[in-house]
Image (cartoon, helix red, strand yellow):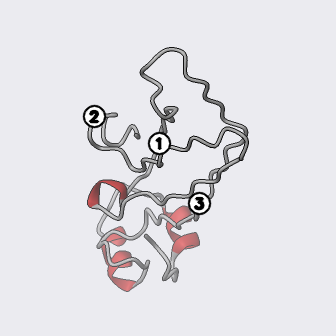
């Protein structure tokens, strides 16, 4: 569950199978959903992990390691028209008095084509 979906029941991003083998370390891998809610994430995201059948007392659950991998995606505040680059169209908007980014930051981003 994540903070993006408000930790709502039924919106789990991954559910593992139940393993009865207590002596083996298992690895589970998942990817966040490719949905609109997860697309333009620009702030922190909280993840919650729950042990299988963790709602009942007396179950032994442990987490030995946790690894979070991700891809850093360039966010360009100078991409005024939302076409994933900072080009002449964005320059026209900037010159017309857009207050979203100062000129120095815009100049640093100008020419980028990898905005997301």
Place of residue 112 in the rendered image (x, y in percent of width and height, measured from the top left) = 52, 80
Q: Is residue 14 above or below residue 113?
A: above
From mark 2 to mark 1, how far is it between C-alphas?
17 Å
Q: Residues within 10 Å of mark 2 (few under 14, many from 20)?
A: few
Which mark is in front, 2 or 3?
A: 2
Q: Quadrant of the N terminus?
A: top left
- Given residues 28 and 59, the one toward you in this image is 59
Mark found first going from the N terminus, 3 or 1: 1
Place of residue 18 in the rendered image (x, y in percent of width and height, measured from the top left) = 49, 43
Q: Residue at x 39, y 70 (%)?
A: 79
- Residue designated by label 1: 45
Mark found first going from the N terminus, 2 or 1: 2
Mark found first going from the N terminus, 2 or 3: 2
For the image shown, how many numbered marks are present on the structure?
3
Hey, which quadrant is residue 35 in on the image? bottom left
Q: Are marks 2 and 1 in contact (CB under 8 Å)?
A: no
Does dot 3 land on a helix, a strand or a loop? loop
From mark 3 to mark 1, how far is it between C-alphas?
12 Å
Does dot 2 land on a helix, a strand or a loop? loop
Q: Which mark is residue 70?
A: 3
Place of residue 60 in the rendered image (x, y in percent of width and height, measured from the top left) = 61, 24
From mark 2 to mark 3, how far is it between C-alphas?
25 Å
Q: Quadrant of the C terminus?
A: bottom left
Place of residue 64 in the rendered image (x, y in percent of width and height, measured from the top left) = 72, 38
Which mark is in front, 2 or 1?
A: 2
Q: Residue at x 46, y 73 (%)?
A: 115
- Residue designated by label 2: 9
């Amino acid at each position: 569950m994540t903070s993006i979906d408000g930790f709502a029941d039924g919106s789990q991003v991954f559910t593992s199978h139940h393993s009865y083998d207590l002596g083996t370390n298992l690895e589970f891998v998942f990817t966040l959903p490719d949905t609109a809610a997860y697309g333009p994430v620009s702030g922190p995201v909280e993840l919650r992990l729950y042990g299988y059948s963790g709602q009942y007392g007396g179950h032994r659950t442990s987490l030995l390691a946790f690894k979070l991998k991700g891809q850093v995606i360039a966010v360009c505040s100078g991409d005024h028209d939302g076409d994933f680059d900072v080009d002449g169209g964005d320059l026209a908007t900037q010159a017309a008095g857009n207050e979203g980014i100062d000129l120095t930051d815009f100049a640093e981003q100008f020419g980028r084509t990898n905005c997301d």
